Amino acid sequence: MKTITKIAAIVPALAVAVSLMMTSPVLAQDPAKGWNQGGGEQDEALTLKPNRENGIEVYEVCAACHLYEGWGQPDGTFPQLAGQHKNVIIKQLADIRALNRDNPTMYPFALPASIGGAQSIADVADYIATLPMNPEPGRGPGTDLALGEKLYKDNCVRCHGAQGEGIAEKYYPRIQGQHYNYLLRQFEWIRDGKRRNANPDMVKQIQGFSDKDMAAVLDFVSRQQPPADMVGTVGWENPDYD
Ligand code: HEC
Ligand code: HEC
């Protein structure tokens, strides 16, 4: 197996420089067109046969922020990607590239000029989906877990599943074992209409959530265990890079 020499350490500095130069893109998505209209490279990437070697090569640039293991940062700055459903990664990446989801930090690195077209999306998404997950995600304070569990059962199970495993075919993300602070930020943006690619049924479902409810339910979610065979061991280092 080919390994790739780590060069990603230099990229974050570049990222800051580029995001400072960029003005925030203001492209409104037409809500009438739906949250998952697909089309273009999303549909194409979904049907392409993934190439693992190219996935490893493309992922090099992503590792600067998401880490070689795909584990992100427990403080939630960078989400964990490891173990996410391939369909979800493809949709989110295509949305970010099409400016349907704002991500000025990552945007320049996700463009075709940086990583290539639909085939690269298919390759990197498939690669990420197979990485073992972080055994020590960032968690919440653990103070309101009974409330969190009740809210989860009443409002989230039908889409994100009993343990937060999501539903791949419907593009419902796996949220179990994700870093608490990242969950909090996304949930708040979805509730308040700032994540433009969000599912409108979820937006409706969580409209009545107070900040306390939000913190409780996401604390509960961050503690849900992915299936044991999907979780890595503490200190695991990705052998595809040296
Ligand atoms: C410069 C840092 C940076 C780089 C490089 C980067 N990302 Fe990201 N990425 C982020 C940040 C920050 C977020 C979360 C943004 C937010 O909070 O909305 C993110 C979010 C994502 C998401 C959405 C996750 C979810 O749960 O919805 C995906 C998918 C993703 N990145 C894939 C990639 C891939 C693939 C690459 C490489 C081609 C990459 N990223 C490169 C910073 C980066
Ligand atoms: C009607 C289905 C539905 C319901 C109900 C729902 N969600 Fe979601 N959720 C989604 C979909 C679809 C997405 C991805 C949206 C997108 O593509 O931007 C999502 C995204 C998220 C995200 C962002 C994940 C990421 O990786 O960025 C979080 C966090 C989340 N949901 C938590 C919850 C919680 C907690 C509840 C219950 C209080 C809930 N959702 C209820 C469908 C749902």
Image: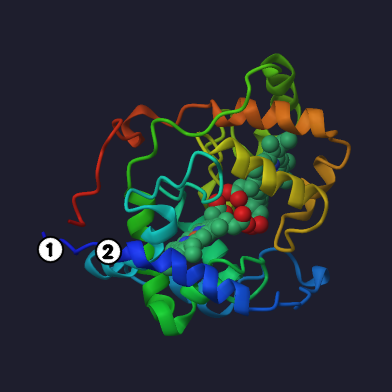
Residue 2 is marked as: 1
The residue located at (38%, 50%) in the rendering is 70
**Which residue is more in the foreground, 22 or 146?**
22
Residue 37 coordinates in the image, percent (x, y): 67, 70
Is any part of residue 68 visible from this angle? yes
**Which residue is more in the foreground, 74 or 31?**
74
Quadrant occupied by the C terminus: bottom left
Left/right placement of residue 11 relative to residue 35 reads left
The amino acid sitting under disc 1 is: Lys
**Mark 2, residue position:** 56
Left/right placement of residue 182 relative to residue 64 reads right
Q: Helix, strand, or loop for circle 1?
A: loop
The outermost residue toward the right is 208
Residue 153 is marked as: none
The residue located at (68%, 46%) in the rendering is 185
Q: Does ligand 1 reach within 8 Å of label 2's beta carbon?
A: no
Residue 171 coordinates in the image, percent (x, y): 58, 54
Q: CA distance from mark 2 to mark 1?
A: 9 Å
Q: Is residue 129 above or below residue 165?
A: below
Picture quadrant of residue 92: bottom right
Left/right placement of residue 2 relative to residue 36 reads left
